[in-house]
Amino acid sequence: MAFWSNRSYLKRYYNLEMNTIKFLKLALVFCVLISCSRKSEIEKEIAAIPIDLKIERFDQLFAKMTPQNLPDLKKEYPFLFSEKYHDSVWINTSRDTIQLEINKEIEKAFSDMSREKDQLHSLFQHIKYYFPEIKEPRVVTITSDVNYRNKIVLAKGLLIISLDVYLGKDHHFYESIQKYLRRNFEKQYIVPDIASMYAKNQVGPIRDRTFLGNLISFGKELYIKDLLLPTFSNAQKIGYTTEQYDWVKVNEEQIWRYFVDRQLLYSTDSTLMPRFLYPGPFSKFYLEEIDKEAPDRVGQYIGWRIVSSYMKNNNVSLQQLLLIDAETIFNRSKYKPKK
């Protein structure tokens, strides 16, 4: 009797467990559907936001510049003409052999910017939704002698885009530039680069000198880019190739363990930033088998994951997130990378 009694009990217990699992699965599906529905409603609201956008092709105007129309150009674009240079300097520059070649390559790559305009329109709609106080800038495209350190300039209501830094990573203009720098000299990174500028402005300067403080600051920027660029891939948002993003995703737990085991989170060692947070050929674990494969800026990815986990597990607004300190975000994030 005891055997059959236990068997009956086990059967009831098993059925209860199965029913519980089914319920949890249904609840999870329901939550996902609710979340997707909410995101869809938000995107509908965003799509209805009016945006006045025009891309001013100064690069084309400069290519066609003459002594006769130069005064009008200087009047229309005074921020692009330094007063310390005589008009003859601008005329000679526009006729320079190298400048003529740049003009030719720009025209081949950017004769039509309708796709970039659509992407910018969507970006500014998202910016306006999440940061209503921000006004659409005046958008101007230029050539800059491949000034890749200032390929996007955002200041005083102006958004200036250097098109000659987006001709493709293998373009012959970039032969003398290190490969890790020119990796993102592609059209597809124009809008993510612009989103980065807005995100940096919202997050502000990094005040926490610890490695964790820097991780979280970059994580906030990438979380904002998540909101501003819903149709872009995660690899595009962080400036990785697909292969690089797949590597950090697969090795997330190992990266995190390295940081924790070596007690790096609360370190103020300034050498950690170029090793794990700044652009470079690779992240420097000083482990030969890893350094050969690891992309640069793996710390930014970890910070992104921590901030995303924090926002998922806490009822906090975006504006509140920007004000919360790194340690609070980390402690309340419930971040735990998958093994």
Image (tube, grey):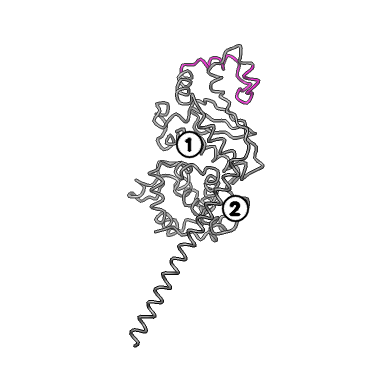
What predominant SS class does the magenta segment belong to? helix
Q: Mark 1 to mark 2: distance in Å?
A: 26 Å
Q: Residue at x 59, y 58 (%)?
A: 315
Picture layout, residue 82 above or below residue 317? above
Q: Which of 215 and 137 is in front in this view?
A: 137
The local secondary structure at tag 1 comes to: helix
Q: What residue type is labelled 2?
A: Leu
Q: Estimate the x, y position of residue 222 in percent, counting from the top left.
A: 52, 46
Q: Quadrant of the C terminus?
A: bottom left
Residue 128 seen in the current view: yes
Q: Which residue is drawn at 39% across and 30% down?
A: 170
- The residue indicated by pointer 2 is 321
Compare marks 1 and 2 and give the one earlier in the sequence: 1
Q: What stretch is highlighted in magenta?
A: 72-97
Residue 87 sits in which quadrant? top right
Q: Which amino acid does label 1 sit on?
A: Tyr
Q: Which of 217 and 42 is in front in this view?
A: 42
- The residue indicated by pointer 1 is 189
